[in-house]
Image (spheres, rainbow, N blue to C red):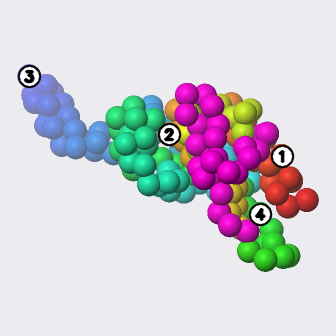
Amino acid sequence: MTYLWIFFVIAVALAPLSHFVPSKRQRKVARMREYAAVHGLFVEFRQLPGNDGARAAASAGGRGQSDTIYYGKRLPPPREKRVPALAWICDQQQWRGLDRHTPVPPQLVSLPDEVLAAGADESSCGVYWREAGDEAGVEQIRLVLEAWSQDLRP
């Protein structure tokens, strides 16, 4: 009986520490981000391009934009004048330019279905997504960004 009480007291004392153990989802996201970083991409929180909050919420399945992650590939500085930031949105598996006058880069059609948007500015090109895939999806994104960055800065 004494051992049972000792076990119970130790379990009660250690129970709050279980809050700090990462979940399966957190470990999976950490692996994907590490894979991206090791293979030359950077990861940061960014808002989806555009100001259409209803579209963003709908594409997020009703979730907020706080979990939108940008996986990007850094570009060398441009030699000529500054390039304007461009963005493309994926609506129902169809890519379109945010300003509707910008042609869609052909590489974007190779992206995983989980990708919500893509963008390019003077310092990087990248994609916005909810990290719903796995490391194979990150590899697919990496290959697309490598090809796209070569087209943007040959």
**Percent coordinates x, y for residue 59 in the rendering:** 45, 35
Q: Is residue 5 visible?
A: yes
Q: Secondary structure at mark 3?
A: loop
Q: Earlier in the sequence, mark 3 or mark 1?
A: 3
| Nearer to the camera, 126 or 131 | 126
Q: Do the residues under discs 3 and 1 have CB atoms within 8 angstroms?
A: no
Q: Amino acid at mark 2?
A: Arg
**SS class of the residue under badge 1?**
helix
Left or right, 1 with respect to 153, comes to: left
Q: Position of residue 6 (x, y in %)?
A: 14, 33
Q: State the separation of the CA atoms marked 3 and 1.
A: 67 Å
**Front position among marks 3 and 2:** 2
Front residue of 146/148: it is 148
> In this view of the protein, can residue 21 be seen by the observer?
no
Which residue is at 60% across, 53% downward? 99
Residue at x 72%, y 43% (from the top left corner): 104
Q: CA distance from mark 3 to mark 2?
A: 50 Å
Q: Which residue is mark 2?
A: 130
Which residue is label 1 attached to? 147
Is 69 on the left-hand or right-hand side of 104?
A: left
In which image quadrant can residue 13 be found?
top left
What x and y, as percent, mark residue 49?
53, 53
Q: CA distance from mark 3 to mark 4?
A: 67 Å
Q: Are marks 3 and 4 in contact (CB under 8 Å)?
A: no
Q: At x 50% / y 39%, what residue is drawn?
A: 130
Name the residue at the right extreme: 154
Q: Which is nearer the N-term, disc 3 or disc 4?
A: 3
Q: Which residue is mark 3?
A: 1
The N terminus, quarter of image: top left
